[in-house]
Image: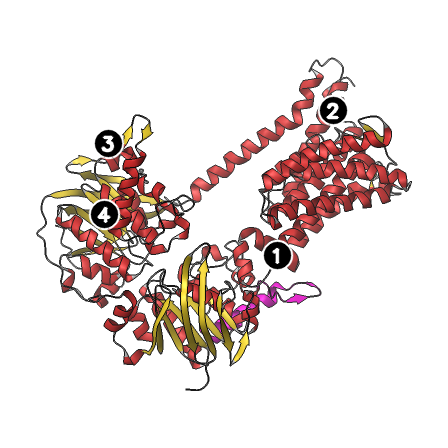
Amino acid sequence: MNSFWDLFSSVNFYVTIISLATPLIFASMAALISNKAGVVNISIEGTMLVSALVGAIFSTLFNSAIMGILIACVAGILMGYIFAFSTIKLRTNEILVGIALNILAAGLVIFIVYALTGNKSDYSSVPLKTISIPLLRDIPIIGEIFFNSLNLLVYLAIVIVIAMSFFLKKTVLGIRIRSVGMNAKAVDSIGVDSEKVKIIALLIAGGLAGLGGAYMSIGFMSSFNTGMIAGRGFIGLAAEAIGAGIPYVTALFAVVFGLVNAFSLTAQTITGINIPYELLNTLPYMVTIIGLVVFAVIKKRRNKNNIKG
Amino acid sequence: MAEALIMMKDIRKVYYPDIVAINSATFSLFEGEIHAIAGENGAGKTTLMKILFGLEKADKGEVLFRGEKVFFHSPSDAMRKGIGMVHQHFMLLENMTVADNVVLGMEPKRKGLYDYKRACEITKDLGERFDMAIDPEIKISQLAVGLKQKVEIIKVLAREARIIILDEPTAVLTPQETKELFHQLKLLKKDNFTIIIITHKLREIKEICDRVTIMKSGNIEGTYDVDKISVEEISKKMVGYDFVVTEDKETLKPGEVILEVKNLSYERDGKKRLDDISFKIREKQILGVVGVEGNGQLELSGVLNGVIRNYEGDISLDGLSLKNKSILEIRDRGISYIPEDRMVDGANLIGNIYESAIVLKSRDKDYRKGKFLKKKKLSEFTDVLIDSYGVKCNNKYDQVKSLSGGNIQKIVSAREIVEARRILIANQPTRGIDIGAVMTLHEKLKELQSNNLGILLISSDLKEIYDLTESVIVLYEGKIVARIKNIKDVSEEQLGRYMLGIEVQEDMEASL
């Protein structure tokens, strides 16, 4: 590639954006539903990592990508349950439990990969096939980007964003989850068990993070690597924070972060540009911090105008 | 009368480790009555009702419902028997609509989904049936306190409660809202609802209740027919000593002007919150500020203590301007401030009493050695405060949160009163606290007054205004609509007309 123009005009670049935004969408939706229930759930990162490995192992075991994804999702729900049980039933601090689970996950996956293969970082999986949709794929540009080279999980991520918005607004459970997040005492006072509602929300979050993890090892790559989540769970949390808890806006920011990620990966291939590779790799995280700061400033300004004298 | 609807027998409740909330209480409730539970803060009223509602478990005793023994393990058990409770601190979801709140936990469904339309209908129907019309689609955060309370009552009615417990329902209401509430309670009584009101306002007991059960330090002092007991007798049984309802205040001659407010205006969000306000406070003077809540009281106290600085006009203390001075500078000049909301601005709820008590004193050079605090001296100081104000606690290291509202208020007030040298601004100093605590505070305010200080008393309790003040200004929409030299010359009704903006005083005396 010779210039930025080449980069921005290539179909591949846009496919990469979508591919890299997908795990962030899963993570941000997990963060969103946790937050709606009033829980700051940083265990999403570790959950994604464990699920990525579980997905890879079971996809090879059953020789089926779909089985791998399903079992990864179950593993995510289990992780969600551990988090929920410790924070809600045992009343431990949710940040500390989150940190503990993330550290546990990081160590656990190395241990398991080593025990199974003898190497300490990789485990190959049965990858998900890309879907090519007849007719739609023939639409110029759009068809090539959206209907020719993506896989099932990408489409599922989009469906989940729409479903999440609907679920929170229109279903009784969704409304109760939001209610618990606003004022758990008020919910308890009318005889609804707020802890149960919270646990359900965290199980859903675990399942979503599990799908995000599975996507990384089965959908995006064809193997598991111990460093492959690389903070995507945390970036999902950031996208949720900037998206102010609105599913569509949150997903939009997940895509923005996906774009930055795609840029940092592909910009290295442009000839004649001398940005060090290490610096480019930090770009997604830098943009996350900048995004959060900008968001905080805007929020502060808005509050200043609303708050009483 | 017939068999009791509810009978609570020999109830005992001890909070961990050894705080006896209820020593032994037996309480009966008849169908269709309005029953007051009266008592000071910390007497055990709310705890007793929480046990009835399944929010707390009794350590001893039993509850009979229509003669049948029942166990309420949670509020849902109580609700199933038709008992509902309106809590003192509302249990509402601020960012949701009225309808959402009303149907929470019993959401109507259509095709498996939440049927918001139906929720609105349910809310509207109930509102109309009980004369509490309220827009179901409005967000709770946009409602005034009185309306929020209505939502709570509709919530209880939607759950088909026949017995409604109201915890201090009028503590946050204006006189007009209280009137409305009583009207609705009477309507409910007509429909054979049974109502329990937890209160310590004697006038309200007299006005609306059929029977009253009086509690004192965890015991029941007795249950009486309201028309057979006088206000004096009730207060005597509540407090244990005679509470004189009307007391002659001694007139002190005001001295030099201490604080002068000149043409004070303050604008926020394009609305004038304070509009050309001028007044003076002299030595030995308690100046009353009355008005329906939200007519500038909060802003006025904010300006005077330095929280709000971008105002127009000038304020001077002993002839020196306070313009652009920080909160600390203003305090150092001798102005103390009892904030309106003790739970938010007054005390650190999760800290202990000692910490909240010394927060001002610890700046004093006599109480510190360089950067370090003289712990022993400050401890003694705290003990003296607790003692002289009669704060009920185990010791000074109790968490503030564990105290009753009246006792928290005593700590906040004590701390401020001790530091006051020229002016004390007291914003709703006795709201929601019991007679005993009110009397203590009133005594202390009078003491300050006779010590040559000036006091600005912002209060929505007119009785307090009549008891303590002589001169009063009335605020309406940020303007002074009446200046009253001697409150005794003005009837409560007339004051009400000023407060509601129905009338503006003719040729206001500018001298005030």
Q: Position of residue B329 (x, y in %)?
A: 26, 33
User: Mark 3 is on which residue type?
Assistant: Asp
Q: Is residue B373 depicted above or below A160 in this figure?
A: above
Residue closest to the eye, A50 or A132: A50
Separation of marks 2 and 3 at Cα, in angstroms: 65 Å
Asked whether the residues under the numbered discs 2 and 3 touch, taking CB atoms below 8 Å apart as contact, a structural biologist would say no
Which is more foreground, mark 1 or mark 3?
3
Name the residue beneath numbered marker 1: A175
Estimate the x, y position of residue B37 in percent, counting from the top left.
37, 70
Q: Mark 1, mark 2: which one is toward the viewer?
A: 1
Which residue is at 44% across, 86% downward?
B2
Q: Nearer the viewer, residue A168 or B332?
A: B332
Cα–Cα gap, marks 4 and 1? 47 Å
Q: Which mark is residue B366?
A: 3
Q: Crowding at label 4, few (<14), some or many (≥20) Cα neighbours within 10 Å?
A: some
CA distance for labels 4 and 2: 65 Å
